[in-house]
Image (cartoon, rainbow, N blue to C red):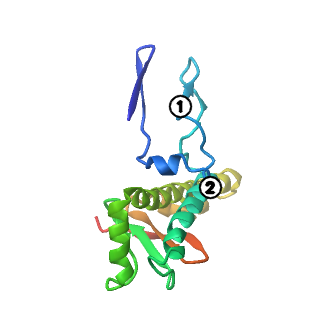
Amino acid sequence: MTSVDINGKALVVQVPAVDEEVLSSPRLPLGGEERVELSAKGCLLARNGLFSPTSESVRALKEELFFRIGKLFREGWISGEPPLSWGLDSDGRLLWRGEPTDPRREVLQQVMEEEPGLGRLIHATLALGEQVRIAEERGAFQQEYGKAEDPRAVVAKYAYLFDERVVWEGTLTVGERSLSLSFRRAFSRG
């Protein structure tokens, strides 16, 4: 976390932990040093090197993840069939969505202990993908609401956006030839 004082007002910039290898990867369009430029009024001018919740950022993370897990497939560490699958639990920890007895699970846990950046990359891909999905849903609501003859019907259609019990459950699935990221609405247990 970085804190900067601008004319007596504190600005806090929080960047999720992503390993150096991911940030310096030639496959990610992030380039250069990380910096945030602000105008005199505190308006954001540039986001070089920061992951913003955009489809392009999610696509770049998915490509990097597919390359890195694909390397495990190519080197014979694990098989990609059936595809591997992860999610996030309610505390934000990685959750294996495959069979509990799958021997690849132990191999992957060992790989992630030796290379913690891989686990962080999976986590970042899921978390950022979730943020993009939520933003897309909210954008669709705003557009429909703005054009609606019956705003109450639009609010009813998108009522889940206002329900604190609704959570998004993401699943990241990686096979030898593909990677997919999907989300579904669910109710939280809390």
Quarter assignment of residue 36 = top right
**Looking at the picture, how far across and down is residue 113, in whole percent?**
32, 62
Q: Secondary structure at mark 2?
A: helix
For the C terminus, which image quadrant?
Answer: bottom left
Mark 2: amino acid: Ser
The residue at the point 54 percent across, 74 percent down is: 74
Name which residue type carries label 1.
Answer: Arg
In the rendered image, the quadrant that contains the N terminus is top left
Q: CA separation, marks 1 and 2? A: 21 Å
Q: Is 75 displayed left or right of 12 in the figure?
A: right
Label placed on residue 35: 1
Which disc number belongs to residue 12?
none
Question: Relative to residue 167, is residue 46 drawn left or right?
Answer: right
Sequence-wise, the earlier of marks 1 and 2 is 1
Residue 14, quarter of picture:
top left
Q: Mark 1 or 2, which is nearer the eye? A: 1
Q: Is residue 8 above or below residue 171?
A: above
Toward the viewer: 138 or 177? Answer: 177
Question: Disc 2 designates what residue?
Answer: 55
